[in-house]
Image (tube, grey):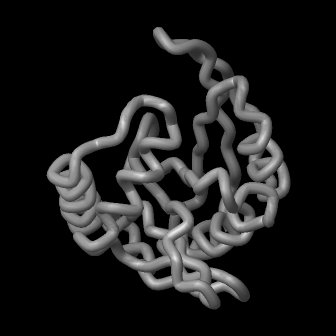
């Protein structure tokens, strides 16, 4: 069992609500994954991803959370903590938003809420891994105080590792 408190799964900002996944989020997740250019998952595949996210949150006490706009109520992506390439003790912050909402500061706003929630768990450091081409993510992480640690590579190219001390 981890020595950390579970992350808060209900976060509110001035413009956003981050909340736990529901199976009804599968359609939005399908559309988000389709924007990556790797094809569109089936409904069953998207529901399986959502179910896996719910189970992982329960098992680890951390989660990627759907991000909705408070006024519109629409799912615009996700943001949260994940083991990813890191560990449950020092997880990764991750976010992915629909292209139609890029450039509005939503990723930074959501990630700030997640940083605060991560600090509340008692963790002292977070990681982020970003593909070397992802300039927009580097801008968000820079605003949040992340610093480059190292670069590794896989079959898809360079991965930049960044870290941030908490709180």
Image coords of residue 161 (percent x, y):
64, 31
Image coords of residue 147 (percent x, y):
78, 41
Q: Quadrant of residue 61?
A: bottom left
Q: Residue at x 68, y 38 (%)?
A: 162
117 or 138, which is in the foreground? 138
Q: Residue at x 53, y 84 (%)?
A: 73
Above or below, comparing residue 88 to residue 2 in the picture: above
Residue 120 appears in the picture as rendered: no
22 or 35, which is in the foreground? 35
159 left or right of 165 in image: left
Q: Quadrant of residue 118?
A: bottom right
Image coords of residue 38 (percent x, y):
42, 29
Above or below, comparing residue 155 to residue 129 in the picture: above
21 left or right of 135 in image: left
46 left or right of 103 in image: left
Q: Residue at x 33, y 68 (%)?
A: 25
Q: Residue at x 63, y 74 (%)?
A: 113
Total numbered badges shown on the rendered structure: 0
Image coords of residue 98 (percent x, y):
59, 55
Above or below, comparing residue 20 to residue 33 in the picture: below
28 or 127, which is in the foreground? 28
Residue 41 appears in the picture as rendered: yes
Quick one: quadrant of the N terminus? Answer: bottom left
124 or 126, which is in the foreground? 126
Q: Residue furthest top?
A: 155
Quick one: quadrant of the C terminus? Answer: bottom right
54 left or right of 6 in image: left
């Amino acid at each position: 069992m981890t020595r950390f408190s579970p992350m808060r799964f209900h976060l509110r900002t001035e413009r956003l609500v981050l909340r736990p996944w529901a199976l009804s989020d599968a359609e939005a997740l399908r559309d988000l994954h389709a924007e990556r250019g790797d094809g569109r998952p089936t409904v069953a595949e998207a529901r399986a991803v959502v179910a896996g996210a719910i189970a992982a949150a329960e098992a680890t006490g951390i989660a990627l959370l759907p991000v909705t706009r408070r006024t519109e109520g629409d799912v615009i992506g996700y943001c949260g903590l994940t083991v990813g390439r890191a560990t449950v003790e020092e997880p990764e912050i991750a976010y992915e938003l629909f292209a139609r909402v890029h450039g509005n500061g939503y990723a930074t706003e959501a990630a700030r809420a997640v940083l605060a929630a991560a600090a509340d768990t008692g963790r002292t450091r977070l990681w982020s891994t970003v593909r070397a081409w992802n300039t927009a993510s580097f801008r968000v992480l820079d605003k949040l105080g992340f610093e480059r640690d190292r670069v590794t590579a896989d079959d898809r190219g360079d991965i930049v590792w960044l870290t941030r001390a908490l709180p």
